[in-house]
Image: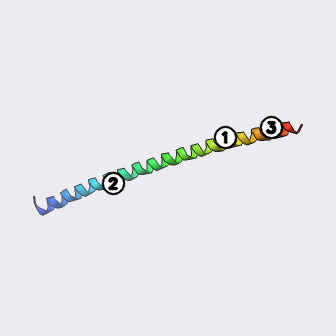
Amino acid sequence: MNQSQSAFSQAGETKCQAQEKASCIAEKASNAAQSAKESCQEAGQQLKAKAQDATEAAKSTVGAHK
């Protein structure tokens, strides 16, 4: 293998490594986005449950004072 072929080979390997790294980064970003989405959904469900509990407590309090 001459020097030119060696340089092309090395460049090809470097390109593959860069593509693998980019793919890995993209996968990590996707996983982080999914995790954030799930966290937001869980927080929303907890907030909804607390609001419903507060509504029921207010209804009970108003009903008790009638």
User: Element at badge 2?
Assistant: helix
Residue annotated with mark 3: 60
Q: Is residue 12 above or below residue 52?
A: below
Horizontal relation, residue 48 to residue 21: left or right: right
Q: How far apart are marks 2 and 3 (CA)?
A: 58 Å
Q: Which residue is drawn at 27% across and 53% down?
A: 16
User: Element at badge 3?
Assistant: helix
| Residue 21, numbered label | 2
Q: In which quarter of the image is residue 49?
A: top right
Horizontal relation, residue 64 to residue 44: left or right: right
Q: Position of residue 29 (x, y in %)?
A: 44, 51
Which comes sooner in the sequence, label 2 or label 1? 2
Q: Which residue is drawn at 65% across and 44% down?
A: 47
Residue annotated with mark 1: 49
Which comes sooner in the sequence, label 2 or label 3? 2
Amino acid carrying label 3: it is Ser
- Is residue 16 or residue 47 the one in the foreground? 47
Amino acid carrying label 1: it is Ala
Extreme right residue here? 66
Q: Do the residues labelled 2 and 1 touch (CB within 8 Å)?
A: no
Q: Is residue 4 above or below residue 58?
A: below
User: Element at badge 1?
Assistant: helix
